[in-house]
Amino acid sequence: MAHDVVADALNMLRNAKKARREVVRIKIISNLLIEVLKIMKQKGAVKKYKIDPKDKSLEVTLGSFNECRAVKPRFSCNKLQIERYKRRYLPSRNLGTVIISTNKGLMTHEEAEEEKTGGSLIAYFY
């Protein structure tokens, strides 16, 4: 049975935030997880992350967020359905980010709407 690395890592981040920890060590990494963390860093949900190639692990310093979760199952949406999933997962219009995997790489819902492209929903945070 395969593990969902992104979902496990986001659960670890959320649990560490609730426990008021500053730094989280994630033992299993993937390229998709690193791209998700890049977007979270751009938005301020993660302050920094450091990849340790010896242990194949990540050390993540938490920023400001209330919730971060993976979307399961990974719904696919076209450019017209993005609004529907924003309403479903985010608490208000101008708060939070949905991460979408498109054929042009991972991007936020704002970038996907701007480029008029759809894709597969990966995660959300606010």
Image (tube, rainbow, N blue to C red):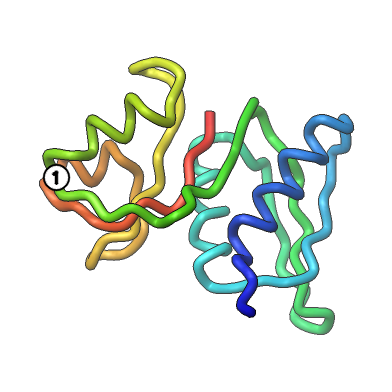
Residue nearest the viewer, comparing 111 with 89 = 89
Tell me residue 86's x, y (percent).
33, 30
Residue at 88%, 37% in the rendered image = 21
* Residue 106 drawn above or below residue 54: above
What is the quadrant of residue 52 in the picture? bottom right
Q: Is residue 36 left or right of residue 82?
A: right
Residue at 42%, 35% in the rendered image = 97
Residue holding disc 1: 79
What is the quadrant of residue 40 in the picture? top right
* Residue 92 drawn above or below residue 43: above
What is the quadrant of residue 68 in the picture? top right
Residue at 37%, 28% in the rendered image = 88
* Residue 103 drawn above or below residue 21: below
Residue at 79%, 40% in the rendered image = 15
Q: Amino acid at mark 1?
A: Lys
| Residue sitting at the far bottom | 54
Q: Is residue 6 left or right of residue 86?
A: right
Tell me residue 51's x, y (percent).
71, 69
Tell me residue 53's x, y (percent).
75, 81
